[in-house]
Image (spheres, grey):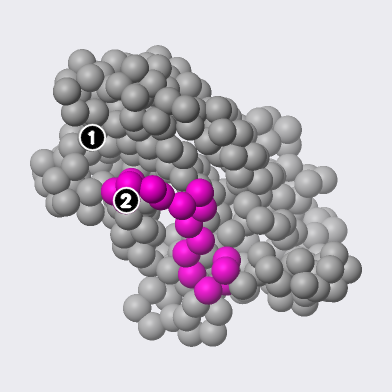
Amino acid sequence: MNPSRAVLITGVSSLSGLSSGTGRALALRLHRAGWPVYASGRSLEGLKDLAQEGITTLRVDVSDEESMIAAVDRITAEHGAVGVLINNAAYSLNGTIEQTPMDEVRRQFETNVFGLSRMTQLVLPGMREQGAGRIVIMSSIFGLFATPGRGYYEATKHALEAIGDSLRLEVHRFGIKVVIIEPSPILGAFVPTTVGDLGLAPGSTDNDPYGDFWERFVVWHGAYREVEHPKGRGRMSLRSGDVAALVEKAITVRRPRIRYRLGIPVRLLRPQRVIFGERAWEKFVRTFFPTP
């Protein structure tokens, strides 16, 4: 019996009820390539357009274990196992280390790290039984270094890098391959237009010692707002379709890379840090990124 090819993608719709750019592009691309795709998210309403395309949609909240178990059980009943898990569910928490409430920090890790970890645990027995499977972990350029204003989000991406490396070594003998995707910034992802869009903790902007920083933070991100004709830094950014094409390659080739780095920024910055040394690297970060 051939191993399952069923693909489970998490985080295709968000809390807002909208389908995410990367998740949606992934679901459509793999479906059109003939993969049995299960697109999941917190809102089925946000997945209606994918359902109309013939894609199976599931309500899965990665902070709700019952919904995760139900999704894996259904796919197992229909295909024998989850063949490919694409851990796409995540969101970016804005806030300084000092001011972000710990409940928000826990929520960030619950979605970006703990939910991913539990979903991975749930699919592994079926993959191990069939002697095959692929697990894709969506990291980020910010899994390689950190900047001011989103340290807790970046900490979750650093955590995924370690989890992916450990998991790959643990499951190699069972025929399961683990791939980490490190994309450069993606155009059209959430880009704030005002400080109010950042979702900062209530009261944190009153007499805020970081207030001027947040104004610069919003202006800096404007380079990634224009999708059709990006300028400046935006010209080196990616589109969701670029990431989807790379993920398809990662789950199709017989021997995938350990990491796929997509886009010029992520390819340049990693060796640049080694060449610069820590002091010069920090000076670069202070110069290039908005800093308090």
**Whole-percent x and y of residue 255?**
38, 48
Horizontal side of 74 relative to 222 (left or right) equals left
Which span is picked out in magenta? 251-267
Mark 2: few/some/many CA within 10 Å (<14, 14-19, 20+) = few
Quarter of the image for residue 229 reads: bottom left
Residue 116 makes an appearance in the image: no
The residue that disc 1 covers is 5
Which residue is located at x 23 percent, y 49 percent?
Answer: 30
Pick the front one: 1 or 186: 1
Q: Position of residue 119 (x, y in %)?
A: 44, 26
- Name the residue type under label 1: Arg
Q: Secondary structure at mark 2?
A: loop
Which residue is pictured at 57% across the width and 69% down the height? 267
Circle 1 residues within 10 Å: few <14, some 14–19, many ≥20: many
Where is the N terminus found, in terms of image quarters?
A: top left
Are the residues flagged by discs 1 and 2 in contact, CB closer than 8 Å?
no
Most extreme residue toward the front, as rendered? Answer: 173
| Callout 1 secondary element | loop
Q: Earlier in the sequence, mark 1 or mark 2?
A: 1
Which residue does the image show at 66% across and 31% down from the upper left?
106
Answer whether residue 283 is magenta in the image. no
- Label 2, on which residue? 253
